[in-house]
Each structure stands twice: as C-alpha cells, then as structure tokens.
Image (spheres, helix red, strand yellow):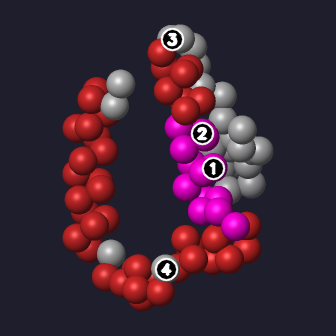
Amino acid sequence: MIEPHLPFITPRVLELVYTAYDMTPQTETGGLKHNDIAKYGTYRTKDLILAVYDVMAAANAAETPYKSPLTPPPGQGPRHPAR
C-alpha cells in the first residue's frame, strides 16, 4: 500500500535525515518523545500520527476521499485567504 508513495516519500526523508543538523540536540535528549512519555505516559505524537495514517490507508483501500480531522482543513483558514 505504501509502494506507490515511495518515489515521493524517499527523497524527502533522505533530505531530512541528512540535513537536519539543528535537530541533533533533540535526538540526543529524547526531545519530543521524552516529553510525550513524561507528560502522557506514552509516545503520544507517534500514536496520533499512526492513527491518522491508519484512517488514510483505510480510505485509500476503500477508494474514498480522506477527510482531514483538522479544523480548519489544510490549505484553508487565516493563512490562506480565499481567492
């Protein structure tokens, strides 16, 4: 299911991995993961991302549009005035 998306994902992941030197302190201290576990008892960010991915994958498998739970939806709101 992820194979069709690999040409898009792979170069972006590699770019992030090889150029995000400013993220080094976060990886050494645990950063967000450590903060999430301390505050929520679980790596909440990962759990939320994987839950959304599961919904997106189900929508893709059912050949139905994915509806974002974000309010306002991506590409809308005060930073994106109507044209």
Q: How crowded is the residue under tag 1: few (<14 C-alpha within 10 Å), some, or many (20+)? A: few
Q: Is residue 82 left or right of residue 22?
A: right
**Visible residue check, residue 53:** yes
Q: Is residue 1 above or below residue 83?
A: above
Q: Is residue 47 magenta?
A: yes
Amino acid type of the residue tagged 4 in the rendering: Gly
Q: Quick check: marks 2 and 1 in contact, CB under 8 Å?
A: yes
Q: Is residue 54 above or below residue 76?
A: above
Give the numbered dot on residue 63.
3
Give the numbered dot on residue 75.
none
Q: Is residue 13 above or below residue 35?
A: above
Q: Quick check: marks 3 and 1 in contact, CB under 8 Å?
A: no
Amino acid type of the residue tagged 1 in the rendering: Leu
Q: Which residue is mark 2?
A: 52
| 4 or 2: tag closer to the N-terminus | 4
Amino acid type of the residue tagged 2 in the rendering: Val
Where is residue 83? Give x, y as percent. 65, 39
Where is residue 48? Give x, y as percent. 63, 49
Q: How crowded is the residue under tag 4: few (<14 C-alpha within 10 Å), some, or many (20+)? A: few
Q: Is residue 10 left or right of residue 59?
A: left
Badge 2 marks a residue whose secondary structure is: helix
Q: Quick check: marks 4 and 2 in contact, CB under 8 Å?
A: no
Badge 1 marks a residue whose secondary structure is: helix
- The residue nearer to you, when weighing 67 against 27, is 27
Residue stretch in magenta: 41-53
Quadrant position of residue 52: top right
**Visible residue check, residue 75:** no
